[in-house]
Image (cartoon, grey):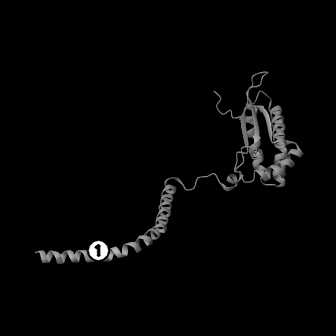
């Protein structure tokens, strides 16, 4: 059982693992995508995404905090200048892991990890990303559903009200002569009925 073991140690000591994660994160920031094993890619995503979130606020404290993890001035500069502008509207999920074929030498599972906003193949709809400002659901529990339903009904009623005058105006002109003939016809029938009796 592995209760409470949240960190994949990747078969390395703590110092080796931290240095490797810092190097991989720096490479990812500078090159925008790297190829590595699937286990390392998953560990790197957990390591680098908080740093990307931190880069959204360009303050001295944020830069020093990120530098303490990366230990590379060039990658910190690239992160705060270029990458932070691209990910400014994204509320999380800055990286994507794509599985590749297994490595020929040892049959290890390989993966490509990349920054989502730098892949032009998948991000053609950049307007859709900018349009959505939050990923949270509007309303709370049952109350949100109750308030949403009357709003929808009101919108339907307004649409019906807008359509009704157009539909009534055209037939009203045609039905006006017919309406005048209708009262006369029963009166004529009543006179014929009285004469017949």
- Quarter of the image containing the C terminus? bottom left
Label 1 sits on a secondary structure element that is helix
> Of all residues shown, which one is farthest toward the right?
73
In percent of width and height, residue 169 lies at 44, 72
Q: Is residue 160 above or below residue 54?
A: below
Q: Is residue 11 left or right of residue 143?
A: right
Q: Is residue 32 above or below residue 86?
A: above
Residue at 51% across, 52% down: 141
Q: Is residue 139 left or right of residue 167?
A: right
Provide the residue designation for mark 1.
182
In percent of width and height, residue 12 lies at 79, 28
In percent of width and height, residue 65 lies at 82, 48
**Image quadrant in which you'd find residue 93:** top right
- Quarter of the image containing the N terminus? top right
Q: Is residue 44 above or below residue 193?
A: above
**Image quadrant in which you'd find residue 18:** top right
Q: Is residue 59 above or below residue 104?
A: below
Please state which of residues 141 and 130 is positioned toward the viewer in this rendering: 130
In percent of width and height, residue 101 lies at 73, 28
């Amino acid at each position: 059982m592995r209760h409470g073991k949240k960190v994949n140690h990747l078969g390395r000591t703590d110092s080796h693992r931290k240095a490797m994660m810092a190097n991989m994160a720096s490479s990812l920031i500078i090159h925008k995508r790297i190829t590595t094993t699937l286990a390392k890619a998953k560990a790197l995503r957990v390591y680098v995404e908080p740093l990307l979130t931190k880069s959204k606020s360009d303050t001295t404290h944020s830069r020093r905090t990120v530098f303490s993890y990366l230990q590379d001035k060039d990658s910190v500069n690239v992160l705060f200048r270029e990458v932070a502008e691209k990910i400014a509207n994204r509320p999380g999920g800055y990286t994507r892991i794509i599985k590749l074929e297994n490595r020929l030498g040892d049959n290890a599972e390989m993966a490509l990890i990349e920054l989502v906003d730098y892949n032009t193949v998948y991000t053609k709809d950049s307007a859709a990303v900018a349009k959505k400002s939050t990923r949270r659901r509007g309303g709370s529990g049952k109350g949100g559903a109750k308030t949403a339903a009357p709003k929808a009904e009101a919108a339907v009623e307004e649409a019906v009200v807008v359509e009704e005058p157009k539909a009534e105006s055209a037939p009203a002109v045609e039905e006006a002569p017919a309406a005048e003939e209708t009262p006369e016809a029963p009166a004529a029938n009543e006179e014929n009925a009285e004469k017949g009796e």
